[in-house]
Image (cartoon, helix red, strand yellow):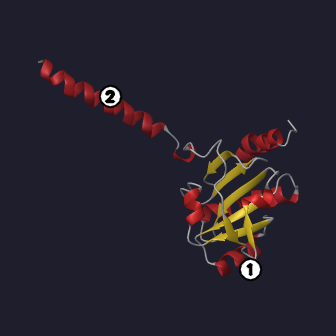
Amino acid sequence: MKRWLWPLGIFMVLVVFLGVGLTLNPREVPSPLIGKAAPPFQLPQLHDPEKTFSQKDVAGKVWLLNVWASWCAPCREEHPIWVDLAKNNVVPIYGLNYKDKRTDSIAWLQRYGDPYVLSVSDSQGRIGIDYGVYGVPETYVIDKQGVIRYKKIGPVTPAVLKEKILPLIAKLNGDA
């Protein structure tokens, strides 16, 4: 009789773990990069490939890095939020154009508006790997010391912007 209790107990533990796992939100995956320096990069600018941009160019500033692509439907969903935020000059927004064709990306920005101070082209996705990109869109809040303070997987909603991103930016800028 005791021989059946061990497999039953192990099965019950697995069922509990599965049940807990099914209740988790995959968009809330904690990033191991939170609290660590943003991975270094130097990429060609989307609009002027002869020029490059790196995270060193924004040292001493709080900024957003938004990973996007013209082929990404959720990017289109969140894009009006970035356009509105850029109009208010709350924080500089930089785009990381991920695994995309330059011509398609530029056409997409011309059609929907360009909220970015500038975008860089990560056509091979190598920098995306360094940043732990699961898929587009993803957004990072990076502080004045170049440390990643927040990562949002998936499209940013007005609620996330208002409740998480903007208060964090204010805090990092010393406004809160």
- Residue 160 lies in quadrant: top right
Give whichever of 82, 116 is nearer the camera.
116
Please state if 129 lies on the left or on the right of 20 as rendered.
Answer: right
Residue at left offset 74%, top offset 47%: 161
Q: Earlier in the sequence, mark 1 or mark 2?
A: 2
Residue located at (78% from left, 68% from top): 114
Residue 122 in the image: above or below residue 13: below
Q: In this view, does 109 lie above or below 79?
A: below
Rendered location of residue 24, percent (x, y): 50, 39
Q: Nearer the viewer, residue 130 or 113?
A: 130
Residue at x-position 70% and y-position 46%: 147
For label 1, count other residues whose C-alpha is less than 10 Å away and answer few (under 14), some (14-19) or many (20+): few
- In terms of image quadrants, where is residue 112? bottom right
Q: In this view, does 139 lie above or below 117?
A: above
Residue farthest top in this picture: 2
Q: How many labels does the image show?
A: 2
Near mark 2 (Cα within 10 A), the count class, few <14, some 14-19 or many ≥20, is few
Left or right placement of residue 92 versus residue 128 in this view:
right
Q: In the rendered image, is residue 80 in sight? A: no
In the image, which disc is placed on residue 174? none
Identity, as a three-letter code, of the amino acid under mark 1: Glu
Instruction: Say left or right for 21 vs 149.
Output: left
Quadrant location of the C terminus in the rendered image:
top right
Which dot marks residue 50? 1
* Mark 1 and mark 2: Cα distance apart in space: 57 Å
- Residue 21 at x, y percent in the picture: 43, 38
Q: Which of 159 and 28 is in front in this view?
A: 28
Q: Mark 2 points at which residue?
A: 13
User: Is residue 49 visible to us here?
Assistant: yes
Residue type beneath disc 2:
Val
